[in-house]
Image: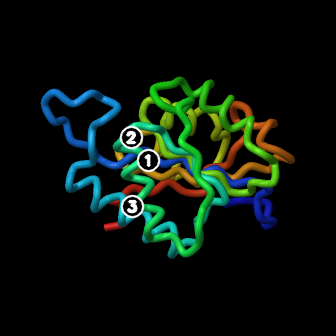
Amino acid sequence: MRLNPMPPKHRLILLRHAKSGWPDGVADRERPLADRGRKAASVIGIYMVREKLIPDLALVSPARRAQETWKLVRRALSKKVSEVEAADIYEVSAERILDVIRAVEPGIRTLLIVGHNPGIENAASLIVADGNVDAMGRMREKFPTAGLAVIDLDLDGWDKIAARTGYLERFVTPRSLG
């Protein structure tokens, strides 16, 4: 149970792109979503709206599968969200993702990153110090495609994010949502 009833100063939402296809002769960066991935991304978008998980800013990998995931999530959102194609989150380490987060303006309260494994999974594991025990167990067991980690941060600005500064508020997958 969370001890602090106050809302977090900042909220980080990490979304792994939805399931992609592996067409012959297509470069990794150009791989499209599979049918299953399109459905999963829509489910996650609807969930985010229902749970009021609306970002102020979305940083999205330039890879086609991440862009397509974001477009399907964005379609469900109730408000326009600023978005930036972020080449710095494609095929990078958790530490690099933290560097990207540190550069975000402090006025952005809720940040969404749509990226790839292993970077997204490793970043979530690196940032989270505590949280919902069930969610932490599921996230550490597997961070599947279209997995969504919601991490609360009691920091004055994104530039303060570091290892073990976050609280895992929830971790959901399309499968866990039914």
Cα distance in 3D space between marks 3 and 2 = 23 Å
Which part of the image, by quadrant, shows the N terminus?
bottom right
Labelled disc at residue 72: 3
Which residue is rendered at x = 36% and y = 58% of the image? 41
Whole-percent x and y of residue 34? Answer: 22, 49
Relative placement, left or right, of 51 versus 20 is right
Whole-percent x and y of residue 157? Answer: 82, 45
At numbered mark 3, what does the secondary structure look like: helix, strand or loop?
helix
- Residue type for callout 2: Lys
Which residue is rendered at x = 49% and y = 46% of the image? 114
At numbered mark 1, what does the secondary structure look like: helix, strand or loop?
helix
Lower position in the chain sequence, tag 3 or tag 1: 3
Lower position in the chain sequence, tag 3 or tag 2: 3
Relative placement, left or right, of 73 versus 2 is left
Give the residue at mark 2.
Answer: 142
- Residue type for callout 3: Leu
Give the residue at mark 1.
Answer: 138
Relative placement, left or right, of 143 versus 159 is left
